[in-house]
Amino acid sequence: MTTRATQVPHPINALLHKYTSLRGAYTDCYLTELPRQVSFSEYVFAFYTTPLFKLERLILKLLVMKPSSDAQARELADGKRDSFAAWTVEAREEDQILMCDFAGSTRSWLMAVPVENGTHLYFGSAVVPHRISKDGKPSLGFFFQALLGFHKIYSVLLLYSARSRLMRKSGNDFR
């Protein structure tokens, strides 16, 4: 069982998969395993209400005037809301959600897959190019390249935080 968040290829049915072939885009996918069954709704709610993500929510509230609450996270998790903080739902299926940021630059993707004796929890991102480099190719720019190492560490920490939250709580605590 993978208790750590590790980088893996996207599942072929991942909503984020379409960005892997977009010229100049960056995508990633991380996986951890939980030794119990959790619903997709439980996972989404746990992910967006971890202390680490609440810090991101506070930053978004202060810097770009995009406030959010745990109640809104619950509505998003239950499929009753199509926006949350700085994101809107780009696509949703029973076991996954793809969110697009308000600037259209990044995508966040969550997926929960039941497996024997547990659940696979996935988290991935896509960053789409909005710039054209001097050679005419799409470019993510210097800023993103400079922050890529931080992004990878932060992604692992977000997924691990959601896993830890789910391990500490029983399913009834998420309602």
Image (cartoon, helix red, strand yellow):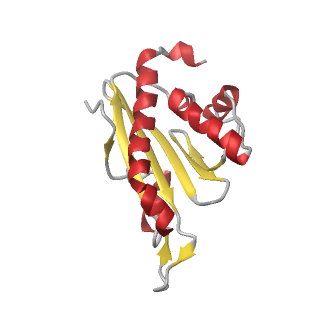
- Can the viewer see residue 84? no
Q: How many marks?
A: 0
Q: Is residue 160 visible?
A: yes
Quadrant where the image shows the N terminus: top left
Viewer-closest of 91 and 103: 103
Q: Is residue 119 above or below residue 59?
A: above
Q: Residue furthest bottom?
A: 135
* Front in this rendered view, residue 31 or 146: 146
Residue 149 picture location, percent across and down: 38, 52
Q: Looking at this rendering, what residue extends furthest in the left direction?
A: 1
Task: Say left or right for 113 vs 3.
Answer: right
Residue drawn at x 45%, y 36% as measured from the top left: 158
Residue 8 percent coordinates (x, y):
31, 48
Q: What residue is shown at x 64% (from left), y 28% (from top)?
A: 74
Position of residue 76 measured from the top left corner of the image (x, y, whole percent) = 65, 35
Q: Quadrant of the C terminus?
A: top right
Above or below 102: residue 78: above
Residue pictured at 31% horizontal, 24% vertical: 117
| Residue 59 vertical placement versus 9 (above, below) | above
Where is residue 37 drawn, in percent x and y?
41, 23
Say left or right for 175 vs 158.
Answer: right
